[in-house]
Image: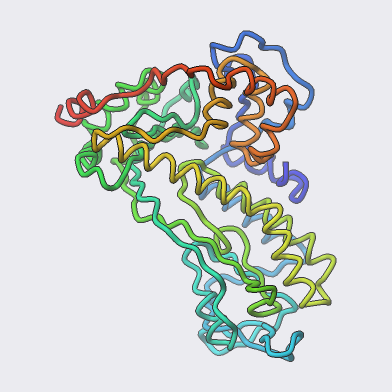
């Protein structure tokens, strides 16, 4: 939705590059437990195009290259920020950047879109600014991913992301007849490292009834490992005062979480839209821009980060308890009831998809009258157990082969 508003033509370019449509509300894609399969007004707005990130980034970069008011300079490395006259007494104002070759590029606003490993906070301190406020933690997930290709993409039978007890399984459609299967688990569970073996990976996926058919393709990679993904959040206004003016961090350079929910690009687009809107109002008022951008980031984008961190903490605690043979911590009661209701109610299911796609916050979805009533019906009632759970003994058997 944001991409169509801000970059007309991007969807068509992505499709030409081999990306594919996804529609969770297509009757063939709805969970089999939902009997009401009638369409709803607005369903078409929730269709989206998906593909592997390099293809999406290529399409966006090509549009930027062709834009008449954009200059793209590749192969240029930034060394430091340069400052100009302060807009707030005692607060440095960023007036541009200096490259490693010594060239100075002046700007009304310097935007950091360098991602989770951005060195910009160090540059801010070197320019005389205070350190931004930082929160950082490692959720301790480890990911095992394999990519496949085939003439026909697998038909989706269940959720994109399904908890299976000691691990979760993530199945993603890709571009140009590709798709991926990811198993992620707690890095503390050393036995799960066996998933790097292709035969072990296959045995475990085959034990997942709603996802086993995602192996029906030709593997195009080995099992790829990713670990040490840090959740990090920066705030550039501290105690009501910007650490610098003339500077903005956007998307993963502002906050990043583990990739299990696949929200990075969606949250990044939303944050870029917030940045654009605030810049339109305050490009000539650096102090006003810094304060409003911080406030609007906190209001519109921050809750997505907080919700994901809460979900990650709950899931890793569950995985660790199962691995240690300890009682599993009770789940978030609201979210547990929401997912239970979504398996049977078409409108609750739509609300869950809105949350997953970062169209709506979970706090807003659960407050809707129909959904609140459905959750109230489940209040105090035992929720059905997850039928997909693979217990410790069976998991040990699958890993041992």
Q: Is residue 134 left or right of residue 399?
A: right
Towards the viewer: 171 or 190: 190
Indicate the quadrant containing the C terminus: top left, top right, bottom left or bottom right. Answer: top left
Q: Quadrant of residue 213?
A: top left
In the image, residue 255 sits, relative to residue 393, either above or below, namely: below
Q: Position of residue 289 (x, y in %)?
A: 77, 71
Outermost residue on the top side: it is 35
Outermost residue on the left side: it is 400
Q: Position of residue 318 (x, y in %)?
A: 37, 37
Q: Position of residue 171 (x, y in %)?
A: 44, 32
Q: Quadrant of residue 24?
A: top right
Q: Is residue 256 left or right of residue 36?
A: left
Outermost residue on the front side: it is 380
Towards the viewer: 108 or 238: 238
In the image, residue 302 sits, relative to residue 96, either above or below, namely: above
Tell me the residue at 32%/43% (across/down). 186
Towards the viewer: 44 or 335: 335
Tell me the residue at 43%/46% (across/down). 313
Tell me the residue at 68%/24% (across/down). 371
Indicate the quadrant containing the N terminus: top left, top right, bottom left or bottom right. Answer: top right
In the image, residue 239 sits, relative to residue 99, either above or below, namely: above
Q: Is residue 307 left or right of residue 360?
A: left
Q: How many marks?
A: 0
Q: Is residue 168 left or right of residue 334?
A: left
Q: How is the image coloured?
A: rainbow
Q: Position of residue 154 (x, y in %)?
A: 46, 23
Tell me the residue at 54%/11% (across/down). 33
């Amino acid at each position: 939705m944001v991409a169509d508003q801000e970059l007309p033509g991007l969807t068509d370019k992505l499709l030409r590059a081999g990306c594919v449509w996804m529609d969770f509300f297509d009757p063939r894609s709805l969970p089999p437990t939902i009997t009401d399969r009638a369409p709803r007004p607005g369903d078409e707005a929730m269709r989206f195009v998906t593909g592997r990130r390099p293809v999406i980034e290529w399409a966006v970069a090509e549009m930027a290259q062709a834009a008449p008011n954009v200059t793209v300079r590749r192969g240029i490395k930034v060394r430091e920020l340069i400052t100009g006259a302060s807009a707030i007494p005692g607060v440095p104002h960023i007036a541009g950047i200096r490259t490693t070759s010594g060239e100075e590029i002046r700007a009304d606003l310097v935007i950091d879109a360098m991602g989770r490993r951005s060195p910009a906070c160090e540059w801010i301190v070197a320019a005389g600014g205070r350190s931004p406020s930082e929160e950082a933690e490692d959720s301790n997930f480890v990911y095992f991913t394999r990519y496949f290709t085939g003439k026909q993409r697998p038909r989706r039978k269940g959720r994109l992301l399904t908890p299976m007890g000691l691990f979760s399984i993530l199945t993603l459609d890709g571009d140009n007849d590709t798709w991926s299967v990811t198993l992620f688990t707690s890095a503390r569970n050393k036995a799960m490292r066996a998933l790097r073996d292709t035969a072990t990976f296959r045995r475990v996926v085959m034990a997942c009834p709603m996802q086993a058919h995602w192996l029906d393709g030709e593997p195009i990679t080995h099992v790829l490992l990713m670990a040490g993904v840090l959740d990090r959040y920066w705030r550039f206004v501290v105690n009501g005062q910007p650490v610098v003016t003339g500077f903005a961090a956007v998307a993963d350079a502002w906050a990043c979480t583990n990739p299990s929910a696949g929200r990075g690009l969606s949250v990044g687009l939303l944050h870029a839209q917030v940045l654009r809107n605030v810049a339109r109002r305050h490009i000539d008022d650096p102090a006003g821009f810094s304060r409003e951008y911080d406030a609007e980031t906190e209001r519109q984008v921050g809750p997505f980060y907080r919700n994901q961190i809460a979900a990650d903490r709950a899931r890793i605690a569950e995985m660790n308890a199962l691995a240690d043979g300890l009682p599993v911590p009770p789940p978030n009661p609201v979210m547990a009831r929401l997912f239970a209701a979504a398996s049977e109610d078409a409108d609750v299911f739509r609300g869950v998809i809105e949350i997953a796609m970062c169209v709506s916050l979970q706090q807003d979805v659960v407050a809707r009258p129909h959904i609140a009533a459905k959750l109230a019906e489940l209040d105090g009632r035992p929720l059905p157990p997850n039928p997909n759970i693979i217990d410790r003994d069976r998991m040990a058997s699958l890993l041992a082969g």
